[in-house]
Image (cartoon, rainbow, N blue to C red):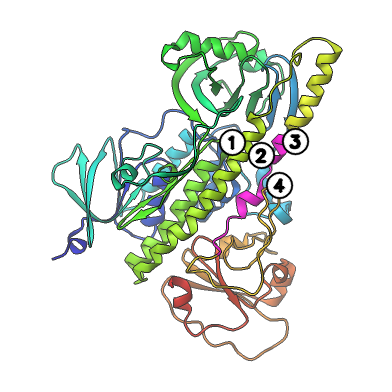
Amino acid sequence: MGLAHEAAFEVAIAGGGPVGLMLAIELGRRGVRTLLVNERPDTSPHPQANATQARTMEHYRRLGFADRIRATGLPPDYPTDICYFTRYARHELARFALPSSRDARVLVRNLGGSWSAAELPHRGSQMFIERVLRDEAAKLPSVSLRYGCRLAGFEQAEDGVTLQLDPGGEPVRAQWLVGCDGARSGVRRALGIGWTGETGIRRDFMGGRMMAMHFRSPDLYAVIGRPPAWMYWTFNAGRRSFMAAIDGVDAFVFHTQLRSDEDPEAIDDEALKAMFFETLGARCELSLLSRSSWLAGHALVAERLREGRVFLAGDAAHLFTPTGGLGYNTGVEDAVNLGWKLAAVLREGAPASLLDSYEAERRPAAIRNTGHARGFADSIGLLVPPEGLEDETSEGEALRRQAGERLLAHAKAEFDIPGITFGTRCDGSPIVARDDEAPPPDRADLYQPTSIPGGRAPHAWLPDGGSLFDRLGFGFTLLELAPDEPVGDAPPVQDIAGLTHLRIVAAEARAAGLRDLYPRRFTLIRPDQVVAWRGERLPGDLRRLMFG
């Protein structure tokens, strides 16, 4: 009997961060026997990614737990502003106002155009989001979570993968393996897959060795003496940094770039606190919870995202400088993309060639997004504070005003990015139909909703107050807009497992503006809410359009 029939698991996942957990949820919701191993004994205790983009929130909504995610982190009425200072307790230079979590729930129902969405972004630390994702994965009977367990090695065969676990006894077998094991991915190294792109980029800021500190301070808000914000940045010639509010009470995470003469190995806890006080421009009560070091200046994508029965996703597949908050969100979309495809091959009889489309779709997306992140890092990191910026003179005041204008323009460019958020496309994919209309230009600051195959299906709020996305099936959806005038009956929709036929009557389509968004009678929407095909007449073989 071959390994594929003997395998205890159908998919094994190395790494229990947001990407690995999201993949486990996508697979587990489809009944795929999944093993997730994670070397840490628990979810991350240290704040890492802090920005969940609107597209990621739409995926959380699709899976039914967006409200749980939005309830994490900052209080519901806490503003998510981005603020720039000379030093946190000195001069405020610019403030880019963004809504609180509570306001976002209301605001999203009144937005159109670029920000027509089922969900808006959420500002919450990865350490909280991972806990929600782990809870959701643990609910699924077909998912086995093994924290405190390391993937020590693996061997591929024609019909599966044999895994050595530590601690562990007998080898474990799976049909497929996915490396979601981070920037230092052991899976990627074992496959001999290198990086493409750029690394070691030096900038005045966001290009070099960074020190991070997770801490509590009960009096920091009072010392700063300004309305609260989600993200704080300093801009001065002495020490630049950024800081995110974690719980809106007393928890924060602080990052600063080391100068060329500073040795990270020689920086003890007191020295790290002193760096914070330097950027604060004052002192406050401070309790250090954890610390870490990382390197800014990456814009890297793996040479390939698959080797036989092994795939790469998340930081194992692409490394970002975190400007724009794109790394974690790009990784979540990796998981969504790969999850439905693996399940289709394992559960719905889709051809194994469907899996070739994962790299064809996600590697160009990673190259695109790392490029955007690098552009944001250049925008803030190559902007050098002028001499005299902190002087208490009329010249200093003028310099601060000029700096504030530049920084506000940067904030708008980095944090108002609907084009990046919603505009990822899969043009050229083997499972996206060609169309006679060209897609709109790819711009960071503008998203043009379109049902041209290869992009996110356009969102709309329906007359009953519900989201169109909530009406889509968990698998494929054939969206049909009933014609205004009677026409000949369309051929019956094929009875295909996992296909939902959603027919919207003419009056509802007009009221919701769907005619402009979906100008063809039929639109085939994939499980990841990407348009696969559209047309006026049903094709003879819908299944071929679905799975290639």
| Mark 2 vs 3: CB contact within 8 A | no
The first of marks 4 and 2 along the sequence is: 4
Q: Which residue is mark 1?
A: 323
Kindly report which numbered mark, 4 or 2, lies closer to the viewer in this rendering. Answer: 2
Query: Label 2: few (<14), some or many (≥20) within 10 Å?
Result: many
In this view, the residue in front, 532 or 8, is 532
Mark 3 and mark 1: Cα distance apart in space: 15 Å
Q: Identify the amino acid type marked 2.
A: Glu
Query: Label 4: few (<14), some or many (≥20) within 10 Å?
Result: some
Where residue 93 appears, as percent x and y from the top left, is 75, 23
Which segment did they paint magenta?
409-427
Q: Which residue is mark 3?
A: 409
The disc at residue 107 is 4
Q: Identify the amino acid type marked 1.
A: Thr
The first of marks 3 and 1 along the sequence is: 1
Kindly report which numbered mark, 4 or 1, lies closer to the viewer in this rendering. Answer: 1
The first of marks 3 and 4 along the sequence is: 4
Q: Identify the amino acid type marked 3.
A: Ala
Q: Residue at x 51, y 47 (%)?
A: 330
| Mark 3 vs 4: CB contact within 8 A | no
Q: Secondary structure at mark 3?
A: helix
Q: Which residue is mark 2?
A: 414
